[in-house]
Amino acid sequence: QAEHFCRYPAKFDLVAGDDGSHRMTDFPEWVTHSMPDEIHNAVLNINLQNYRDIRDCLAEDTLWVIELYVHWCPHCQALFATMFKLGHILANSGTKVRFAAANCAVMGELCNEELGAVGHPLVTFLYKGADLRIKSWIQ
């Protein structure tokens, strides 16, 4: 099961059961009937160089939400489908929010040295804009 969580796009959705466990299910039709580019652009899989490119060339009005995960972590797996659906919705809505993710099991230099990840899942943000509401929220 963990191999399905190694890279985006997510292969299936997770639905919470009454007992607190999660079960795999198919994505809703609005996701599965999307264009392939929309699905692959929902969450960008990043490495150290992609991250530095995003950081250095960041548009001032764009907020990047970056998920750091390890594919074998149950909490990361639960967040995986949620991030994918949210990334898909926002990428297709015209908002200035983009999603990226790195599997820290294979991107240790990015996660540990560049971003200082101390646990997983970890969500971090990149934003160079002037909106003080966003700046105060993400710090």
Image: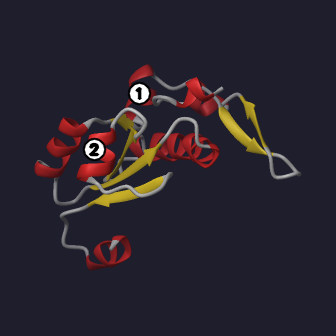
Q: Residues within 10 Å of mark 1 (few under 14, many from 20)?
A: some
Residue 5 location, quadrant = top right
What's under tag 2, amino acid-wise? Leu
Tell me if 55 is positioned left or right of 136 in this view.
Answer: left
Q: What is the C-alpha distance between the residues marked 1 and 2? A: 21 Å
Which residue is at the front of the view, 10 or 33? 10
Left or right: where 49 falls relative to 92: left
Q: Secondary structure at mark 2?
A: helix
Q: Residue furthest right?
A: 18
Residue drawn 24% across and 62% down? 127
* Residue 94 image offset from top left, x and y in percent: 35, 47
Q: Quadrant of the N terminus?
A: top right
Q: Earlier in the sequence, mark 1 or mark 2?
A: 1
Q: Residue at x 17, y 51 (%)?
A: 55
Q: Which residue is mark 1?
A: 40
Give percent across and percent down for residue 57.
Answer: 11, 48
On the image, the x and y values in percent for residue 78 come to 63, 45
Q: Position of residue 120 (x, y in %)?
A: 50, 52
User: Looking at this view, is 41 or 104 the one in front?
Assistant: 104
Give the labeled residue for mark 2: 110
The answer to which image quadrant residue 29 occupies is top right
Residue type indicated by callout 1: His
Q: Is residue 20 above or below residue 12?
A: below
116 vs 119, left or right, is left
The dot on residue 87 is none
Quadrant containing the C terminus in the rendered view:
bottom left
Residue at 59% over, 42% down: 73
Q: Residue at x 46, y 22 (%)?
A: 35
| Image height of 115 relative to 74, above or below | below
